[in-house]
Image (cartoon, rainbow, N blue to C red):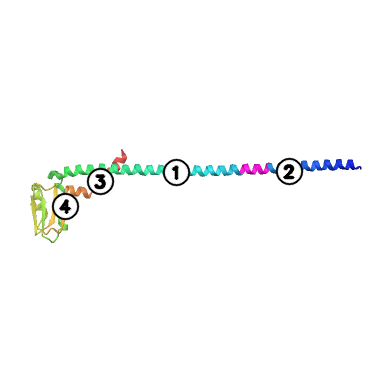
Amino acid sequence: MSIDALLDVLEREAQAEAARLISEAQQQAGEILARADAETDRRRAAALGRLEQEARRAVARRTAATARGFRAERLQERAAVLERVLAEAERELRTAGADRYEDQLAAMVAATLQFLDGTPAVIHCRPEIAARVELCRGERAGLTVVPGADAAAGILGEAADGSVVVDNTLPALLRRRAPELGMAVAARLEAT
């Protein structure tokens, strides 16, 4: 083989080798670019996912804050309604006639005397129920029934020395039951 032929063969082999190397380099470059694109897509998706989660959390926080504010407003409104209802009921009970509580009078006197046991005491009541209170007290010594036109409906007992006061007037009984009545009113308001 001549030198020219040998040079032609070497040149063709060199060109083939160069073409193969270029092809491999292009293939590797394509794979690198594909991996880079895939990594970029993965990172973009992860970043979008984080942003979506943060947005959902922000919406959830705002929603929860709004719901808490709404519940607080409703509780305040409910408390204001209950306070108005109780105040109106207290005004009415303060001047209620004896017929509204006459059937409970014996129990009211007994409950009052229970706290005043063994001490000289005074029971304040309205004049129209004074005789019934006298009957309900029984044989208890040291107890004075004092009728007063300005007395609230019900009875008010106190130790003669002022150390104990038992307020069983209708307005006081209402106030003691206010939490229970508040729950009942709230249940009715929720039902409507």
Marks 1, 4: nearer the viewer:
1
Name the kind of residue labelled 1 in the image: Ala
Residue at the extreme bottom: 118
Q: Which residue is mark 4?
A: 167
Q: Which residue is mark 1?
A: 58
Residue at (56% x, 42% y) in the render: 44
Q: Quadrant of residue 1?
A: top right
Side of 140 relative to 27 (left or right): left
Side of 96 relative to 65 (left or right): left
Residue at mark 1 to residue at mark 4: CA–CA distance = 53 Å
Q: Quadrant of residue 165?
A: bottom left
- Residue 133 among magenta residues: no
Reply above or below: 80 against 115: above
Is the magenta region chiefly helix, strand or loop? helix
Q: Position of residue 182 (x, y in %)?
A: 26, 45
Name the kind of residue labelled 2 in the image: Glu
Q: Position of residue 41 (x, y in %)?
A: 59, 42
> Can residue 76 be seen at all in this image of the molecule?
yes
Marks 2, 3: nearer the viewer:
2
Reply above or below: 121 against 9: below
Say whether disc 3 or disc 1 marks the residue closer to the N-terminus.
1
Name the kind of residue labelled 3 in the image: Leu
- Mark 2 near mark 3, Cβ–Cβ under 8 Å? no
Q: Which residue is mark 2?
A: 24
